[in-house]
Image (cartoon, grey):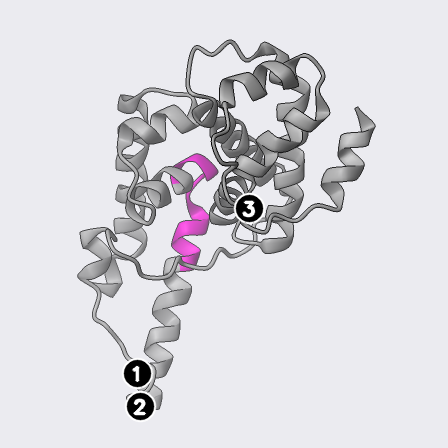
Amino acid sequence: MDGICLELAGKVPVGSARLAGVDERALIRRAQGGDRAAFDDLVRLYDRNVLRIALQIVRSPDEAQDLYQEAFLKVYRSLSRFRFEARFSTWLYRVVTNVCLDHLRRRNTRKEIQAPMQAEGEPEYFQSIADESPTVNPEQTLRAQEIGQRIGRALARLNPRERVVFEMRHYQGLKLRAIGDLLGTSEETAKNCLFRATQKLRVELSELV
């Protein structure tokens, strides 16, 4: 079991293409039976998505790569308990998300989290904040920096699950049902979590409107 730790420690996802014509169910069955080559193929199928999810949650490339390794190690150790009652990708992404959330909870001190880059599907609330171009003049540059810092601090004050739900919904465009599946909870719980996060951000950022 330690062998996979050593292999993953030196492996960095490079966006491997999906294996052509792969029978995922057969790979899982073989990996559950101890076939390391089959498990390596599963890693290659999902390595890019797993690293992206980790990076989106923790916002640190170094931490994301560590969590990528931790998540696949956890998958390796618990794969025998996978019963095909859900899609393997859903189960895998849930493991990754929970590993990342646990990591955030273990942090002794909160680090300021930078606001995500603007993307399609951002919440209407942020669209109501005036667009400040950093190239117009020094005052507008300073104002834009202050806004970015305020948004970052507001996001940092959310608890890890609230922030993840908020970003999955508004920056990744995921539906609440999909978010609930990834977090191992219900759509209604994800909806309530999103509501609490939005309300907190409205209070924190009310002066920016």
Image quarter in which the C terminus is found: bottom left
Residues at marks 2 and 3, CA–CA distance in whole angstroms? 44 Å
Residue furthest front as drawn: 21
- The answer to which of marks 2 and 3 sits earlier in the sequence is 3
Q: Are marks 1 and 2 in contact (CB under 8 Å)?
A: yes
Asked where in the image residue 165 lies, by quadrant, the reply is: top left
Secondary structure at badge 2 equals loop
Image quarter in which the N terminus is found: top right
Secondary structure at badge 1 equals helix
Magenta region includes residue 153: yes
What residue span does the magenta drawing correspond to? 152-162
Residue 207 lies left or right of residue 46; in this view the side is left
Q: Amino acid at mark 1?
A: Gln
**Residue 148 to residue 167: above or below:** below
Q: According to the image, label 2 marks what residue?
A: 137
Q: Residue at x 25, y 55 (%)?
A: 120
Q: Position of residue 141 (x, y in %)?
A: 35, 82
Q: Amino acid at mark 3?
A: Ser
**Residue 186 to residue 149: above or below:** above
Residues at marks 1 and 3, CA–CA distance in whole angstroms? 43 Å
Residue 152 lies left or right of residue 69; in this view the side is left
Q: Position of residue 187 (x, y in %)?
A: 28, 23
Asked where in the image residue 28 lies, by quadrant, the reply is: top right
Q: Are marks 1 and 3 in contact (CB under 8 Å)?
A: no
Q: Position of residue 16 (x, y in %)?
A: 55, 46
Q: Amino acid at mark 2?
A: Asn
Q: Mark number for residue 140?
A: 1
Q: Nearer the viewer, residue 135 or 54?
A: 54
